[in-house]
Amino acid sequence: MRDQRSGPHLLPRDRSCLLGFSPSATLVFVAEKDPIDRIEIDPRVMLGKPVIRGTRITVEVILEKLAADRTIEEVLADYPRLTREDVLAALAYARQVLGTDEIIPRIRTA
C-alpha cells in the first residue's frame, strides 16, 4: 500500500480547506477519477499555489487567460503540455473552491 503522506498526486484530505492551505496540512493520495485530481498543491512548487499536476502551470494563470477572453484552444497553444482536460480541471477546481461556505469579501472604498 502506498504511503498516504507522500506521492506525486497530493491534495488536502478536506478540500474545503484549500483556501487556507498550509504546509502542515494532512495530505492524502488521490486516485484520478475526478477532474480536480489533476490539480496538485505542494508548498515546494509555486509557493503552494494550485498547479496542474506535473507542471508549474498554476490554476490562477489558466483562469486569468480564460477571463481575458482567450479560448481553451488558445490556452492550449500557449501551454503545449496542457490538455483540454487540464483546463477543465482548473475550472472545476475554481468552482469547488468558490462553492465553499467561506467567502472573502471585497470591500469597495469609493
Image (cartoon, rainbow, N blue to C red):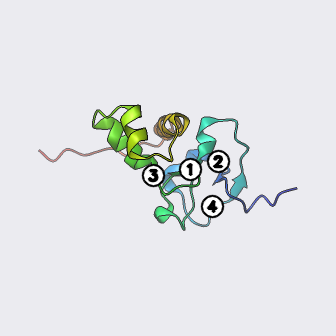
The amino acid marked with disc number 1 is Cys
Q: Residue beneath label 4, please?
A: 25
Residue sitting at 24 percent across and 46 percent down? 107
Q: CA distance from mark 3 to mark 1?
A: 18 Å
Q: Nearer the viewer, mark 2 or mark 3?
A: 3
Q: Residue beneath label 1, please?
A: 17
User: Crowding near pointer 3: few (<14 within 10 Å), some, many (20+)?
Assistant: many
Q: Residue beneath label 3, please?
A: 58
The amino acid marked with disc number 3 is Thr
Check the picture and name the quadrant holding the N terminus.
bottom right
Q: CA distance from mark 1 to mark 2?
A: 6 Å
Look at the numbered discs 1 and 2 and tell me whether their residues touch, using CB distance below 8 Å. Answer: yes
Look at the numbered discs 4 and 1 and tell me whether their residues touch, using CB distance below 8 Å. Answer: yes
> Considering depth in this image, is 98 or 47 the residue closer to the camera?
47
Determine which quarter of the picture holds residue 103: top left
Task: Work out whether mark 4 precedes mark 2 in sequence or the reverse, and give the earlier one.
Answer: 2
Residue sitting at 54 percent across and 57 percent down? 21
Estimate the x, y position of residue 30 in percent, counting from the top left: 71, 47
The amino acid marked with disc number 2 is Asp
The amino acid marked with disc number 4 is Ala
Q: Residue beneath label 2, please?
A: 14
3, above or below 58, in the image: below
18, above or below 35, in the image: below
Q: Secondary structure at mark 2?
A: loop
